[in-house]
Amino acid sequence: MRLENVQHVYCQPPPAGLRRDMRGERCGKRVVTGFAYRNGLASSWWCLCECGRRWIVAQSSLYGGKTKSCGCTSAAKTHGQSHSRLYHRWVTLRQKAVKENVPVADAWSDFQVFHRDVGDRPTEQHVLARKVLADGYCPGNLSWILHPGRPGVIVEVDGESANLRQWARRIGVSRQCMHQVYHSRSLPMVKRYIREHLKGQVDGKR
């Protein structure tokens, strides 16, 4: 199945005659993205969690906000790291993967497995980075790397952190250009500038 068809499945409109279109409705960490199926009078919908997981929820469970997440909130309480930097980086990476159709190892839907594979951050000078952008997030391709030289200004984009010199090298622009962008624009605009260049590199490899 082609990728655009998969995305279309997740965003299907409800059938004619259904009273309520729940697409776009948000509660807690989940948002309804599309109609899934109907079994008699009972309808079910595709939902997207902030952690990046998609799953089907019965409409009766959506009423009144009974279902607020895919279960990652409960899982976060058990591993005790829901407020750690690594946990938030994991959430951000999964969100980016869904948004940009970047493949992620199936086992990494579990934070504890992700934590076991990448380990703790060795020092404040280490950042998570992919060796090959087109290969996605998987063991062996995502690892901690040490900042060469002084960290300088650190900018985090979709869970990956680097200083301006490193981002300039990653996206193929001069260091002077990167510094000019940083000093002339707001931080969100700098992140957008980096994302656009990274996306262009990935698209160029497909």
Image (cartoon, rainbow, N blue to C red):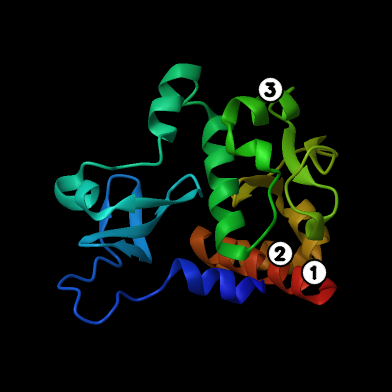
Disc 2 residue type (three-letter) = Met
Residue beneath disc 2: 178
Disc on the earlier residue, 3 or 1: 3
Residue beneath disc 1: 173
Would you identify the image quadrant in which residue 150 lies?
top right
Tag 1 near tag 2, CB within 8 Å? yes
- Is residue 81 rendered to the left or right of residue 21? right
Residue 108 image offset from top left, x and y in percent: 65, 37
In what element is the residue under mark 3?
loop
Residue 1 image offset from top left, x and y in percent: 66, 71
Disc on the earlier residue, 1 or 2: 1
Label 3 CA crowd tier, 10 Å (few <14, some 14–19, many 20+): few
In what element is the residue under mark 2?
helix
- Whether residue 153 is visible, yes or no, is no
Residue beneath disc 3: 120
- Whether residue 108 is visible, yes or no, is yes
Among all residues in the image, which is located at the extreme front? 40
Would you identify the image quadrant in which residue 28 lies?
top left
